[in-house]
Image: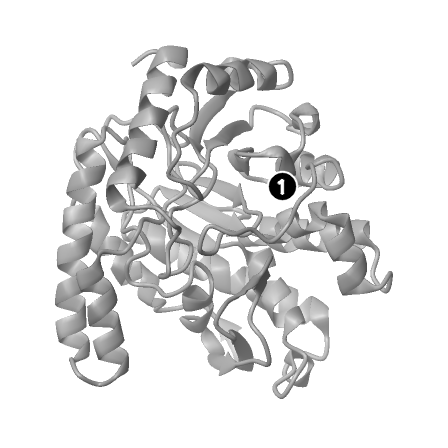
Amino acid sequence: MSKAKAPFRFDIVGSFLRPEELKTARREFSEGKITEKELKEVEDRAIEELIAKQKQAGLPVITDGEFRRSWWHLDFMWGLNGVEKVECKQGYQFNDEETRAESCAVIGKITGENHPFVEHFKFVKTFEDETVTARQTIPAPAQFLAELQRNTGKNPTSAVYPDEEVLIQDIAAAYRQVILELYEAGCRNVQLDDCTWGMFCDTRYWEERQQKAVNLQTIAKQYVIVNNLAVAELPEDLVVTTHVCRGNYHSTWASRGGYGPIAPILFDKENVEAFYLEYDDERSGNFEPLKYVSGDKKVVLGLITTKSPVLENKEEVISRIREAEQYVPLERLCLSPQCGFASTEEGNCLTEEEQWKKLELVREISEEVWGK
């Protein structure tokens, strides 16, 4: 196919609001009212309709909207060998809201073969044509490591992996296995979603979490290492990008603070082709940290919020793109919403119609700034 490589001037982060039929089917499956086959039929139909809408919107990339998942990250982790789903004491905190209290635990050696997401991708791949490419979104290796570090309760990770270096090596190897199987299935665009960096930017959160027991720079370097190990020696025509998230649950957020604390490490050292960065409000700070984006890496500016149905002012968004251009050349900049529309199946507080209007605005601005 003669298509451009990701990222794209008009881009997305990946998740979309779940239609009510899909939400109902997932609930009925969990209650034992329908079979797995019946659920898959609903998922397939919903994804096919979503892809048609993505193409109609003019997007150069298609995803399954994460319609087969409950979470943007945990479902992937549960799909790895040696990992199981667990209930935990409390969910993630998002201002005044708390998520479902679910996590993952290690029960054996972590490996990546036969991951269910590969079959999920194959379905999306069938809808590729000369105008669109299929993307697979997965949580970053660092995000998985952070989740296992979070789990210190009934099933501590150290019980299986007393040596954290061995854990890091196995995580990286498992990810490479999944990514290579995706590649064999025809995937040429993998996006690593990563909340760890957004939380590092929030110095108050970091100090409360670590109580100065762990140096921020030390653990940030550890996270870059595991991410880079996972994407080492992959095929040259496979594009790997990353989305830095600041929390996106039911239109709430988890962290605030500019990219300054992590920019010299993340933007310079992480081996990805592009960073999808949240810049939809003052919580993200200014664009100056972009000066650390090294080489020919690209930046996808998340200037359009998915947390509110209110449409941004087009001229103000264009003005912000011009500000970012002071640090990264325009030819290495792109535009997208700041995050997905439904990082979890609950979704953000806007309608499907408002969701597509947001993407129409992204397309209009990208065409005005970079041309069609």
**Residue 115 lies in what quarter of the image?**
bottom left
Q: Is residue 141 above or below residue 366?
A: below
Q: Can you identify the residue that label 1 sits on?
A: 270
Asked whether the viewer can see residue 126, the reply is no
The residue at the far bottom in this view is 154
Q: Tell me the SS state at disc 1.
A: loop
Disc 1: CA contacts within 10 A as few (<14), some (14-19) or many (>=20): many
Classify residue 226 as left or right of residue 208. Answer: left
Image position, residue 232 (x, y; %): 55, 48
The residue drawn where x is 37% and y is 19% is 366
Q: How many marks?
A: 1
Front one among 25 and 186: 25
**Residue 365 lies in what quarter of the image?**
top left
The residue drawn where x is 28% and y is 47% is 186
Classify residue 346 as left or right of residue 100. Answer: left
Image position, residue 312 (x, y; %): 43, 26
The residue drawn where x is 70% and y is 50% is 200
Q: Is residue 313 above or below residue 15?
A: above
